[in-house]
Image (cartoon, rainbow, N blue to C red):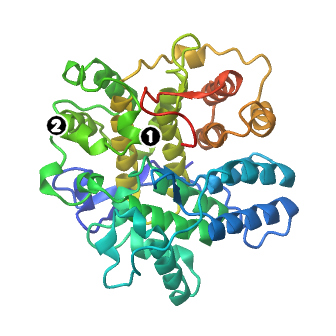
């Protein structure tokens, strides 16, 4: 068995995320998931995956629909592949999801080493950032991991502290890059991280205004905090409907309205045993999606699904990124979780909806089959969610079958996503 954590020295002021006065933070020790070397694999399915990832990389931008939405094709292809999809099915996934994507457009200018930070947060430079990072790839002997570490996880105020911007898509993309060992997906992830960079970084960077100690309570349970958030009357009436804040990039306005309250709950999460708390966070991520669904009144929530998808990405990355960023990465996920949960009007999380699910003989083989042949097989987010639940079960064990029951409930009942409000449709998000 692994120890819960070990301590390491922390650069760039990241020790403040662990607590005032600390010189080091814990390292969260996990075994790596299986890494699939799709660039060199000989098997037909893997070759198909490699070629389709390359085809997407060459032909399609990382954003579409006025740069409001994200290219999910690597997530779709990767999840389907890892759940056993055939080469033919992978091609169907590509054909289905590529219909809404758009070709690359020229950026307003090029990017170089001396000015690469000047255009952070400007999605018009998506192509220029890909070109820049691919130039760096050549200069680093095609070692894409070295390029990722240099530009995400080093220097002052590293942009790796803002991977949950853009509803977590840079983080999700990076997870698939590592799991599939794909330099093309890695370069896209770097571009997404650069173009999505926004104000959220200040809560993770070394800014004294946002240090721990801002909370009136503390607990190691993320579900307990979410329950407190649900009952917090200071958040009543904050939003008229769900969806718009998340989908339209208006998250900054939410922080303007309730920053102090949100940060109080953010800093309340006590990571005294970080590996255990990360385990609990994965349990919470599953519950936030599956235990808020009600067949009569509330579909599965599209935005809460990203809480699970980003948690899965964190699980992929923790054994593979510099240890000094482990706590910061988990904290990023927590900040996104609170923000999305509030934005979606704080639905009640009823664990009995999951624990009471009758399996009726359904197992993970059934879940895999539903992911690639069921009614949600052409929905990238549905497939990603099932994959995340399965990997969580594999990581922590599932003696009480919580993750299996969550996956069965999702696969059995999924018809469409909800949570959009009147201003936003599900189309192509």
Is 61 located above or below residue 106 in the figure?
above
Q: Is residue 29 visible?
A: no
Q: Residue furthest top?
A: 296
Q: Is residue 377 left or right of residue 258?
A: right
Q: Please tell me whether residue 391 is drawn above or below residue 346 in the rendered image.
A: below
Disc on res. 313 = none
Labels 2 and 1: the sequence-earlier one: 2
Horizontal and vertical percent position of residue 378: 72, 40
135 and 26: which is toward the camera: 135
Instruction: Please tell me which residue lies in front, 244 or 143.
Output: 244
* Label 2: which secondary element: helix
Whether residue 329 is visible to the viewer of this picture, yes or no, is yes
Residue 401, by quadrant, is top right
The answer to whether 21 appears left or right of 147 in the picture is left
Residue 276 is labelled as: 1
Crowd rating for badge 2 (residues with CA inside 10 Å; few <14, some 14–19, many 20+): some
Residue 116 spot, x, y in % from top left: 35, 77
10 vs 314: above or below: below
Disc 2 to disc 1, how far (Cα)?
27 Å
Residue 380 image point, x, y percent: 65, 43
In the drawing, does residue 360 fall left or right of residue 403?
Answer: right
Left/right placement of residue 169 relative to residue 153 reads right
Seen at 28% across and 17% down, the residue is 231
Circle 2 sits on which residue? 260
Image coordinates for residue 6, horizontal then vertical, percent? 40, 57
- Graded by Cα atoms within 10 Å as few (under 14), some (14 to 19) or many (20 or more), the crowding at tag 1 reads some
């Amino acid at each position: 068995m692994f120890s819960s954590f070990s301590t390491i020295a922390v650069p760039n002021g990241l020790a403040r995320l662990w607590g005032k006065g600390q010189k080091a933070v814990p390292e969260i020790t996990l075994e790596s998931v299986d890494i699939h070397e799709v660039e060199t694999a000989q098997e037909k399915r893997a070759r198909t995956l490699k070629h389709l990832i390359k085809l997407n990389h060459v032909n399609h931008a990382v954003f579409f629909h006025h740069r409001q939405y994200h290219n999910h094709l690597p997530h779709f292809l990767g999840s389907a592949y890892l759940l056993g999809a055939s080469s033919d099915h992978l091609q169907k996934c590509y054909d289905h999801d590529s219909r809404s994507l758009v070709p690359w457009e020229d950026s307003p200018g090029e990017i170089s080493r001396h000015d690469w930070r000047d255009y952070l947060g400007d999605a018009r430079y998506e192509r220029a950032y890909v070109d820049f990072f691919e130039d760096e790839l050549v200069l680093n002997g095609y070692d894409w991991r070295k390029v990722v570490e240099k530009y995400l996880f080093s220097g002052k105020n590293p942009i790796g502290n803002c991977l949950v911007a853009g509803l977590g898509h840079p983080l999700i993309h990076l997870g698939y890059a590592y799991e599939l060992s794909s330099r093309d997906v890695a370069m896209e992830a770097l571009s997404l991280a650069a173009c999505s960079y926004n104000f959220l970084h200040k809560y993770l960077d070394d800014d004294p205004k946002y240090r721990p100690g801002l909370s009136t309570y503390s607990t190691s349970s993320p579900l307990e905090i979410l329950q407190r958030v649900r009952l917090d009357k200071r958040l009543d009436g904050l939003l008229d409907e769900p969806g718009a804040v998340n989908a339209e990039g208006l998250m900054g306005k939410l922080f303007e309205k309730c920053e102090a309250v949100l940060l109080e709950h953010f800093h309340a999460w006590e990571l005294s045993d970080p590996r255990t708390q990360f385990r609990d966070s994965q349990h919470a991520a599953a519950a936030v999606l599956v235990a808020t669904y009600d067949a009569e009144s509330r579909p599965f929530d599209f935005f809460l699904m990203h809480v699970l998808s980003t948690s899965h990405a964190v699980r992929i990355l923790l054994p593979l990124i510099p240890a000094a960023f482990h706590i910061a990465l988990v904290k990023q996920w927590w900040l996104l979780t609170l923000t999305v949960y509030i934005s979606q009007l704080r639905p009640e999380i009823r664990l009995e909806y999951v624990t009471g699910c009758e399996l009726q003989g359904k197992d993970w083989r059934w879940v895999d089959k539903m992911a690639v042949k069921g009614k949600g097989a052409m929905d990238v987010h549905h497939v990603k969610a099932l994959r995340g639940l399965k990997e969580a079960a594999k990581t922590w064990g599932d003696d009480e079958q919580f993750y299996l029951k969550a996956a069965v409930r999702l696969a059995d009942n999924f018809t469409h996503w909800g949570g959009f409000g009147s201003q936003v449709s599900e189309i192509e998000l």
